[in-house]
Amino acid sequence: MSLVPFDDRDGFIWMDGQLVPWREAKVHVLTHALHYASCVFEGERMYDGEIFKLTEHNERLIRSAEILDFKIPFTVAQIDEACKLTAAKNGFDNCYVRPLAWRGAEQMGVSAQQAKIHVAIATWEWASYFDPALARKGIRLTYAKYRRPSPETAPTSSKAAGLYMICTISKHAAEKEGYSDALMLDYRGYIAETTGANVFLVRDGVIHTPKPDCFLDGITRRSVIGLAQKMGFEVVERHIPAEELGTFSEMFITGTAAEVTPVAEVGEHAFQPGNITFSLMDDFSKMVRRQLQPA
Ligand code: PMP
């Protein structure tokens, strides 16, 4: 696979209020965030010139930062505008948008009360999170070695960089074994999410989804619940023990990057992507392109 490194591209990145040439958007090696994971981020997507649920995402960015005890020195409206400006400056109508905020290099050590809070926004083209050939066939998942921690152990409702350490380890292990991703259970053994998307399961025409009490309540997740309810489906949010996996017929995951992606397999359990998954995939695709009212 030939990779275009992310630090060596043409274009512009918005940094602390200014658009800077892509290759000059740098931080120092003694940046607090790099040592202590004092960083929060968002993943957003622009479809045909409009960023889906832009304000909701940037509100979450600010909330994520507050949970980590830092205050972003920009308003939601300013970050919204900056996201649009960055995409426009890079000439994108369809792209991924990555705002992030982090503690700088003014202070080093666990305590960093005086460290400055920085904000940056980058945009790039990102067509499909998984192999497009699997878009309707479904991806294969294995189980992650790590579990989603309890809210008493980590700031689980923040989209904080530090919480992704166990995701990268788990996704690497899955990929090494030929799977697309890994299913993470939570600290109690309930089904939580994958390493970057929320989970839905279907049984007897009813849609079940884990209660997001120790992992991210995805913006895509909430949109898809709304779409499903509008279609007349019952959606049950509850704790789902891993032992129940074998009782479901369809499974899919949702996220800004993953969109709505069917799952064909989790370890020993097989699923058949079916009508409910396909209808939600199609309606989600219409909704983000404004051919269907947001649910
Ligand atoms: N869980 C995790 C761990 C994620 O990284 C993401 C992607 N941000 C999601 C769930 C889905 O969230 P959203 O629909 O808001 O993108």
Image (spheres, helix red, strand yellow):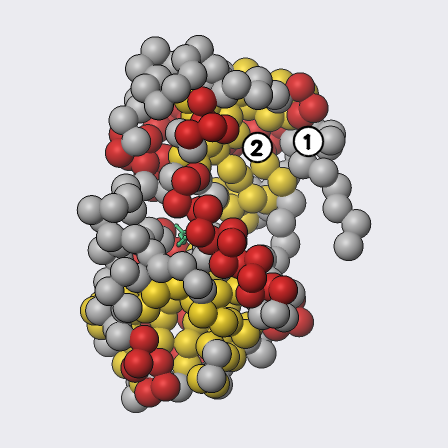
Q: Above or below — where is 28 with respect to 220?
A: above
Q: Position of residue 174 (x, y in %)?
A: 55, 65
Q: Above or below — where is 198 with respect to 54?
A: below
- The residue positioned 50% from the left and 28% from the top of the image is 34
Amino acid type of the residue that numbered disc 1 sits on in the rendered structure: Asp
Q: Position of residue 195 (x, y in %)?
A: 45, 57
Snapshot quadrant of residue 188:
bottom left
Alpha-carbon span between mark 2 and mark 1: 11 Å
- Crowdedness near tag 2: few (<14), some (14–19) or many (≥20) residues, C-alpha within 10 Å: many
Q: Which residue is mark 2?
A: 122
- Image quadrant containing the C terminus: bottom left
Q: Position of residue 121 (x, y in %)?
A: 52, 29
* Residue 268 in the figure: left or right of residue 216: right
Q: Which mark is residue 109?
A: none
- Name the outermost residue toward the front: 109
- The residue positioned 44% from the left and 63% from the top of the image is 145
Q: Which mark is residue 7?
A: 1
Secondary structure under badge 2?
strand
The answer to whether residue 264 shows anywhere in this view is: yes
Q: Above or below — where is 203 with respect to 138?
A: below
Q: Position of residue 153 (x, y in %)?
A: 25, 46
Amino acid type of the residue that numbered disc 2 sits on in the rendered structure: Ala
